[in-house]
Amino acid sequence: MDFLSIIIIAIGLAMDSFAVCISKGMCRQKFNAFRSFKIALVFGVFQGIMPLIGYALGVGFTSLIERIDHWLAFVILLLIGAKMIYESLQPKEEIDCNCNCQESEVINWKVVITMAFATSIDALATGLIFVPYHDMIIKAVVTIGVVSFLFSFAGMFIGVYFGKRIKIDMTIFGGIILILIGTKILLEHTIFA
């Protein structure tokens, strides 16, 4: 697996966090960079750690996984991508961002951690595709974490300033990206091997 594939996988995985952070930013009147940094850091840490956990769980099955790694990567990325696309096409409740509540700079860490965990579960399964690539796991974990942090921070910014005008669900793009990467890995190991 090359580094470009890792970056593209990281972008695909970051789309859930990106979409959540846009929606949360939409309900704020002004952008607070330090507050957004802390929230984005939590999303980045969860997205980075989960593939490492998936990788660690899969290491015990290395001999089995190495024989079918391309099929495993394809199926995992296809299922995660399809799930993201399916969820993005489901009807959603409108977010009422015209509330007259006072904005607090206090972060509800319980909500942030819950959202970060929920959006990073897909990354846990993705960790299995790195089992045959022992030399790439640290690079993958750091890359996925950093990309998720950057996308989450950008999502908060975009949500505050442009969110009410944007009606695009970025999760569908993340799903498509993951399916395409899975297909690329499968083709590289079967047709173009």
Image: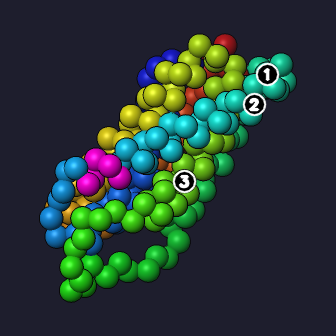
Q: Looking at the picture, does residue 111 appear above or below residue 76?
A: below
Specify whether residue 44 is in view.
yes
Which region shows up in magenta?
35-39
Cα separation between marks 3 and 2: 20 Å
Image quarter where the C terminus lies is: top right
In the rendered structure, does residue 107 fall within the stretch colored magenta? no
Residue 129's quadrant in the figure? top right
Q: Which residue is mark 1?
A: 62
Q: Amino acid at mark 1?
A: Thr
Are the residues flagged by discs 2 and 1 in contact, CB closer than 8 Å? yes
Q: Of callouts 1 and 3, which one flags the residue occurring earlier in the amino acid sequence?
A: 1
Which residue type carries mark 2? Gly
Please name the residue shown 22% across and 73% down the image: 103
* Sequence-first disc among 3 and 2: 2
Residue at point 70%, 40% (across, down): 75
Q: Nearer the viewer, residue 190 or 26?
A: 26
Residue under pointer 2: 58
Q: Is residue 165 above or below residue 32?
A: below
As drawn, is 5 to the left or to the right of 157? right
Between the C-alphas of marks 2 and 1, the distance is 7 Å
Residue 177 location in percent, x, y? 48, 41
Q: Quadrant of the N terminus?
A: top right
The residue mark sitting in front, 3 or 2, is 3
